[in-house]
Amino acid sequence: MNEERKNRYNRRKFIQTAAKQAAATTLVWYGLSDMAAIAQPMTQPAEGSVSDNVLQELKQYHIVWDAPAKNCADSMPLGGHDTGVNVWVENGDLLFYIQKSGSFDENGEYLKLGRIRVRLDPNPFEQFTSFRQELKLSEGYIDISTENSKPDGELFKTKLRLWVDVNRAVVHVEIESDEPLNATAAYESWRYEDKDLAETIGRERFGCFELEGYPGKVVKRKDQISFTPKGVLFYHRNAGDKLIPGMLIKQQGLEAEEAHITDDLKNRTFGGILMGTDFVRYGTGEGAYQNTPYKSWIIKSRTPQKKHHLIVAGYIKQTELFGDWKAGLEKLASEALKDKSAFAASCLWWRHFWIRSYICIFPGKPDPANPVWQMSRNYQLFRYQLGCNVAGEYPSKFNGGNLTFDPVLTEPKHTYDPDWRAWGGDVFTAQNQRLLYWPMLKSGDFDAITAQFDLYKKALPGATARVRAHFGHKGAMYSEYIGVPGLAIGSGWGWSGAKKRNRGPEIPFGAPEANGLAGYDQPAEAGIMANASIAYHWESQLEHAYMILEYHRFTRIDIGSYMPFIKAAVVFFDEHYRLRQKMRNGKELDAAGKLVIFPSTSCESYKGATNPTDLLAGLKACLKSLLALDEKYVTPGERKYFKDYLLRVPDYSFGENNGQKIIKPAEKWLREANVEMPQFYPLFPFNQFKMEDAEIAAFKNAYSQAPAFRKGVVMSWHQDGIFFARMGMTEDAAAYNTKKLKNSERKFPTFWGPGHDWTPDHNWGGSGMIGLQEMLMQTVDDKIVLLPAWPGDWDVSFKLHAPHETVVEVEYINRKFRKLKVMPASRQKDIILPKSVVS
């Protein structure tokens, strides 16, 4: 516990120092000298109080709508701390969904806290003469304003401001009008009664993906909702007879290890309270929204007023006693109502968020119709969405984060309630999740990135228990679908005797017929999932270990609490595949003294693989990074082991095709499946080659010769734009990343999807962010390569973070560097400026 407190303190200290540096640096850069505007508390987000070019540029990225929404698919994102809010005006009502990180029920389904409906009388959203809804990106809140005609023809104005307290995750609605208005606020819930989730009809259990195909009964339990003297109390307390993780432990034969496995759902209670200043109980109601019935609990202003203030305080905690949870919620709500500086503090937080990094293409020349300009605007918008969960207990989910809406508006066949999403629940698909978190290194969002790391740290006891019980060796094995218990996902393991996702007969660990190809209904190797796509797909644990090591290289923040995970994730492959090879022929290594990594898979695309390229790159990257750490993290004995281990890692497999040298996805494989291109993982994410290396030609050849169905896809997790940038293919990188980050088909520009996943598709945005960053700056080894894949005629201003606590600021205008600032100055010597963009 002392170490944890120390780590949190050091992390906060680093981030606070970085924020101060960012603010001070920006002021110096643009010639401002007055720090008072940043340092002093404010009651309003005063215009010009931090009047630097960055925040002025952000104002051009504000999203402004002049008409209400058709439905919640036209919603606007809002958030802060760990809470996401979808805001829209429809048929005269203000509505918003609220979702909070960690609101997992007893089935592992990721539930919203609910929906709020605000109605005003006289109604300014009916028969208005003007309407304006604006996301004030620079300060993180939404303004909605109208003008209406009174009977005598005079106009009266009404303004609503919605914001989330970044320190308490409380949603505020402030209403101000020229005329006194009555206000009602309704808490609407579709979880007012228990509901059986169908086993095989449709995909209703896909919302709690862990249990899809489970042959038993799955009940979605109702919430508890009631009036209190202060407002409407609503909550969900997970039932004691829940299925997860107890049922998974039994399913996977881990009863003897149960004491080591973390249960993050036991006694989990989540919910909140809707209350307002001088509001009273009004009654109940019912209705239906997007085919989902709901009931409502309504409060009403005691009298008409020109000003109203509503809050929704949300709270989550695992507590033995419900009373402890309730006391925590009441304390939170009380503090939120008393704190008169919270809005100013939240605005200031967002200003610092934007000052610490940014990318602005064609600065000062807004052109919303230009997809290239859209690219940097949408980079900022999506970064905002990620920033809305900066303090989340759990990472933002790749398939919508905290900003999903009714599924029928994404795909009409999914007529489920607003909680439902594809690939839903308390498991986090690692290959998708990683794309949301890699860009946080260069954006400097080090406060947000650790939730993804903590997922692996929390899961370590279960991940090591699996290896110990099933294989009898050291190390940790993580499912591609990672959850806090650290077990295999239930639906991926497979259910014995099930109609759907059935686990076939089990064969012993190491059996000769275990070749990495079997799937559901077929013989399953002991300890291995039945899902053929991910059964032997373990690269992601290396990638997240390497991400933490890179986080340390960027920040020098202490990673001691993560080292057990990193070491266990790496050691697993040495232990596991030496054992498998010994079971095959009595020798742990091949004739050259190398590991034989089989059966395996290269991503999900090359099944039954031997020595997959993505895995080899991950091992090399992690081992080299571990060897670069000091003795605080790696003992002399461990250092010798890692050096020897690195020598055992096989070399990459290069081949020849059509007379050209290419990098192969693996040494060999038995079957091709998905559309990934893991042969490029040595470039990204594992940084094993630089643009000037001779091997880059083999990567380019491999891409040009790849089948058409594997390349050029511009959606979801596809990473071609990143690979193009890493190969120095400027024209291709520019074309692809422009398409990747152009406006979505939704009303809000960065609500992409569904693609392969869902809407909003967060790994779509994350991969686009990385692609744009890699075009501007690459940081392999200790060098900082600027504009490595940047079109010379694209003006740009950016500020990004680099390893060793380095910040780089650039203005590149008319093919000239107007500004180039590196902090600390000692890192100036490591800057590389490509000749192709220097005139």
Image: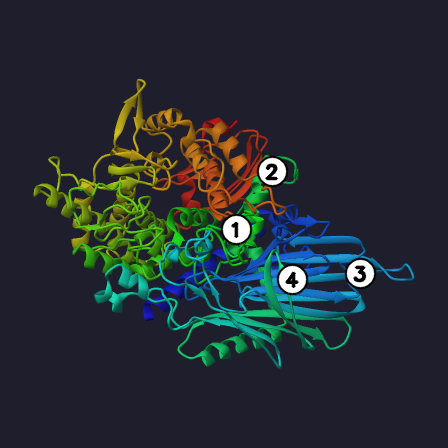
Q: Please name which of the two marks, 1 or 2, marks the residue nearer to the observer.
A: 1
Please tell me which residue is depicted at 52% across the width and 51% down the height of the picture.
414
Q: Give the amino acid at mark 4.
A: Leu
> Nearer the N terminus, badge 1 or badge 4?
4
Q: Give the amino acid at mark 2.
A: Trp
CA neighbours of label 2 inside 10 A, class few (<14), some (14 to 19), many (20+): many
Q: Give the amino acid at mark 3.
A: Lys
Q: Is residue 461 visible?
A: no
Which image quadrant is residue 661 in?
Answer: top left
Query: Which disc number belongs to residue 414?
Result: 1
> Nearer the N terminus, badge 2 or badge 3?
3
Q: Please name which of the two marks, 4 or 2, marks the residue nearer to the observer.
A: 4
State whether residue 189 is above or below residue 720: below
Which image quadrant is residue 424 in?
Answer: bottom left
Would residue 445 be found to the left or right of residue 683 on screen?
right
Q: Which residue is more in the foreground, 410 or 180?
A: 410
Please tell me which residue is depicted at 43% across the width and 32% down the height of the picture.
724
Q: CA distance from mark 2 to mark 3?
A: 34 Å
Provide residue 457's location: percent of width, then percent of height.
33, 60
The kind of secondary structure element at disc 2 is helix
Q: Label 4: which residue?
A: 162
Q: Label 3: which residue?
A: 157
Provide residue 733's location: percent of width, then percent of height.
48, 32
> Nearer the N terminus, badge 1 or badge 2?
2
Q: Please name which of the two marks, 1 or 4, marks the residue nearer to the observer.
A: 1
Q: Label 2: which residue?
A: 373
Q: CA distance from mark 1 to mark 3?
A: 40 Å
State whether residue 355 is above or below residue 271: above
Q: CA distance from mark 4 to mark 2?
A: 28 Å
Q: Give the amino acid at mark 1.
A: His
Q: CA distance from mark 1 to mark 4?
A: 30 Å
